[in-house]
Amino acid sequence: MTRPKVKSGEHELLPGVKAGDRRALARAITLVESTKSEDRAEAEVLLSQLLPLSGGSVRLGISGAPGAGKSTFIEAFGKHLTGQGLKVGVLAIDPTSRRSGGSILGDKTRMEALSRDPGAFIRPSPAGITLGGVARRTREAMLVLEAAGFDVVIVETVGVGQSETEVAEMVDVFVLLLSPGGGDDLQGIKRGVMELADILLVTKADGDLEQAAGRAASDYHAAMHLMRPKYPGLTAQVLKVSAMKGTGIAEAWAAMRAFQEGLKASGSLARLRAEQARRWFWSEVQAAVADEVAEDGQAAQVEADVAAGKVLPHAAARALIRRFRHA
Ligand SMILES: Nc1nc2c(ncn2[C@@H]2O[C@H](COP(=O)(O)OP(=O)(O)O)[C@@H](O)[C@H]2O)c(=O)[nH]1
Ligand SMILES: [Mg+2]
């Protein structure tokens, strides 16, 4: 294959992505997910051409413990949005899917209607990507979807690990789904994840679970008032939804949109996105420096010395960088 695929300055996937062509979108995302260095160079050409077209989406993070009802909710919510003529992209981050092997399949069957919807584009987690690679891949895939004119981009993550913080750092509105009757320990959801939430949705507010959902909603409402708000004076809203009955979905969307609009009107959105871009930049600097240094012949020996307790990591890192800079 000849690379990069650029004709008269334009990447060959650019027109297709701009037109929202699904094949072009899928290929573009595969390209940005690739870790091969020749693909990386090509991805950077494409991404730099997409960047001026990006930024127009409502960026939503949706998190919650396994079983909280994320897939079912996203399907109903996505259909609600496409029903209004909006284009919806869904990017999944699921570090557990590689181990259990089951969740992607589950998501696929549950989001079947949405994945067939011409107004929606669903991209499951790629297999074999490192957690460190997840953030970049997702941000860049988000950029591709934005450039393609998607109105809403949803990043779905499982509420069990550090990926929540990473997702909260790339979206405008972070939504946490909690199922009723999850128990006192907040269903294994860490307090830290609760603190990231801009909006809490108590799921499965139907049938036998309806009462429990009401109780859970008041408990969470009380709990959120005891937490330090993410934005001064702005306590996270708690709403009840039933993806099964389709209730609360429109209200949830109204709350998310109002939240994002509020951030926009106050200038907070521009500041938030600028801060996110700054942090992303510095994490890329760290990753790039680490990559370069790891290739240095001395690095393995210094690492072994650190592991053996002969030298402290901080001192070893500084010494290695110094040597590297003068090389
Ligand atoms: N009663 C009820 N059950 C639901 C609802 N949403 C999801 N569930 C059930 O909860 C379970 C987990 O849902 P799923 O969407 O796969 O959760 P995820 O792991 O967070 O993606 C499934 O058995 C769903 O059928 C709902 O609105 N009402
Ligand atoms: Mg799921």
Image (tube, helix red, strand yellow):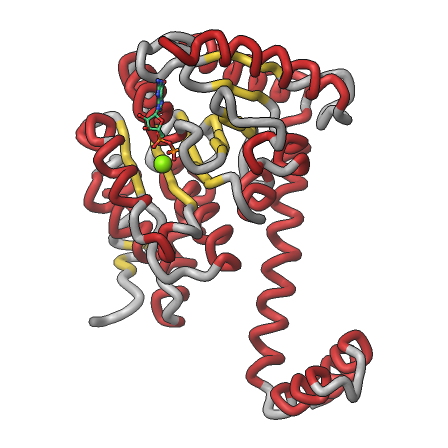
Could you tell me which quadrant the C terminus lies in? Answer: bottom right
Quarter of the image where one finds residue 127: bottom left
Q: Which residue is located at x 51 percent, y 21 percent?
A: 181
The reply to whether residue 16 is visible in this rendering is yes
Q: In the rendered view, does 144 fall on the left or right side of 271?
A: left
* Residue 325 seen anywhere in this rendered image of the structure: no
Q: Name the residue at 25% across, 47% down.
A: 26
Viewed as shown, does residue 236 lie left or right of 135? right
Foreground: 47 or 29?
29
Give the camera-side residue of 181 and 146.
181
**Splitting the image into 4 quarters, where does residue 93 fall?**
top left
Q: Position of residue 290 (x, y in %)?
A: 61, 72
Tell me where residue 279 appears, x and y as whole percent.
65, 49
Q: Position of residue 167 (x, y in %)?
A: 54, 41
Q: Quadrant of the N terminus?
A: bottom left
Q: Residue at x 47, y 14 (%)?
A: 252
Q: Is residue 52 above or below residue 312?
A: above
- Residue 64 image point, x, y percent: 49, 33
